[in-house]
Structure formats: C-alpha cells, structure tokens
Amino acid sequence: MVDGIALIGFMGCGKSTVGKELARRLNYHFIDLDTAIEHGEQMHIPQIFAQFSEQYFRDLEHQYLTEQRPHRVVLSCGGGLPIFARNAQLLQENWCTVFLDCSFEACYRRICHSTRPLVQNSTPDQLRVLYDSRRPLYENCCSLQIAADSSPFAVAGDIIKQLRLHRH
Ligand code: S3P
C-alpha cells in the first residue's frame, strides 16, 4: 500500500469524512490541510480571506503542503489546491492522489449553508461554473479517480480496493 494518499476534489465532495474513514481503516494519520493552516495561523479560513486575501491563503496552502511528509498519511486537500501548477506538481511527485469525483448537486447540498468564502461570495450558478472548470484539472492531477456520490464508508472501501488492485 502507498505511504501517502492525498484526497482532492470540489468542496463538499467528502474529502474530510472519507479521509478520516480511510485513515482509520489503514491505520494511517489523517491530516486536513485546511485545519492544519487554521491551527498554525490561529485563524479561521474565512478570516484569512477577509483580513488578508485569497492569494495570501493560496501561499499558505502551498507552504503547508510542502511541509507534509507522505509517510502513512491520508491528506485532505482544500478544493482549490490542485488548481495551481506548483501544488499539482508536488501531489504528482510525492503522493498517490485520489480524486473524489462527486456530482455538483451532491457537493452543493453539503456546502450551500457553509461559511466557506467562495460559497459566501458566489451564486449557485457561479459555483457550478467553478466546478466545471476545476473537474478536468482534478482529473489531470490524480492517479486514481473514484466515484464519490455514495456513503463515505463505501467510498473509503472503493479506494482501498482500487489501491490494492493497482498496487499504487
Ligand atoms: C477552497 C476550498 C476549501 C478551503 C477554502 C478554499 C476552494 O476547502 O480550502 O475555502 O478554493 O475550493 P474544502 O474543499 O475542504 O472545502
């Protein structure tokens, strides 16, 4: 089994829930990069966006990604992280990157009431455009693409099956 598994996908696709379940089953550590940033900076992400800027957050996101070591770790990445070439390159070089491919409708149901800055500042139509523009980038960056509309328990099981099958 691979040493470092990074989960990518749109906001609300289930990276954190699936990631925790996956880490539990593999006996790996679970790291949520957004939570690591919040702990490290002692600020919530909406605050970082508001007080500094999205670019400032993107730089932090990149810095925290470079600090992760892919040793028996399941890493949940923020939805925008793989969109940037410098991050996609790190994921491709150091991690087995798994794209949780979830429909926009299922993602939207989970995020529509959230305080995520991009959700607060966008209409549903704008979020769909963002979803459509990001999907091919997630596909390009990943080594494994998993349908993720089912329960987190089932998705974690599918990931393990595929990793064993392809000996990632
Ligand atoms: C973002 C996704 C969020 C968080 C930030 C920006 C994005 O993470 O990193 O609000 O650009 O899609 P989740 O995908 O975990 O919600």
Image (spheres, rainbow, N blue to C red):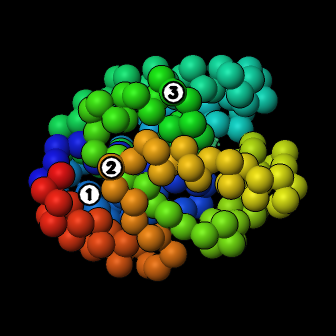
Residue displayed at 26% across by 57% down: 23
Kind of residue at badge 1: Ala
In the image: residue 129, left or right of residue 88: right
Please identify, in this view, whether the residue under mark 2 or under mark 1 is nearer the observer. Answer: 2
Quadrant holding ligand 1? top right
The alpha-carbon separation of the residues under discs 3 and 1 comes to 27 Å
> Which residue is at the front of the view, 91 or 110?
91
Q: Which mark is residue 46?
A: none
Q: Which residue is mark 1?
A: 23
- Three-letter amino acid code at the position of disc 3: Ala
Residue underneath mark 3: 85
Question: CA separation, marks 2 and 1?
Answer: 18 Å
**Viewer-side label of 3, 1:** 3
Rounded to the nearest angstrom, the CA distance separating label 3 from label 2 is: 16 Å
Residue at 32% in and 69% down:
156
Q: Is residue 14 left or right of residue 116?
A: left
- Type of residue at label 2? Ser
Q: Is residue 109 above or below residue 116?
A: below
Asked if residue 155 lies left or right of residue 40, the reply is left
Where 57 falls versus 101 (above or below)? above
Residue 9: x and y in percent read 52, 53
* Mark with earlier residue (2, 1): 1
Earlier residue among tags 3 and 1 = 1
Q: Which of the two residues, 166 or 3, is positioned nearer the viewer here?
A: 166
State the image coordinates of residue 103 (x, y, percent, origin top left): 60, 70
What residue is disc 2 on?
143
Asked if disc 3 and disc 2 are in contact, CB closer than 8 Å, the reply is no
The mark nearer the N terminus, 3 or 2, is 3
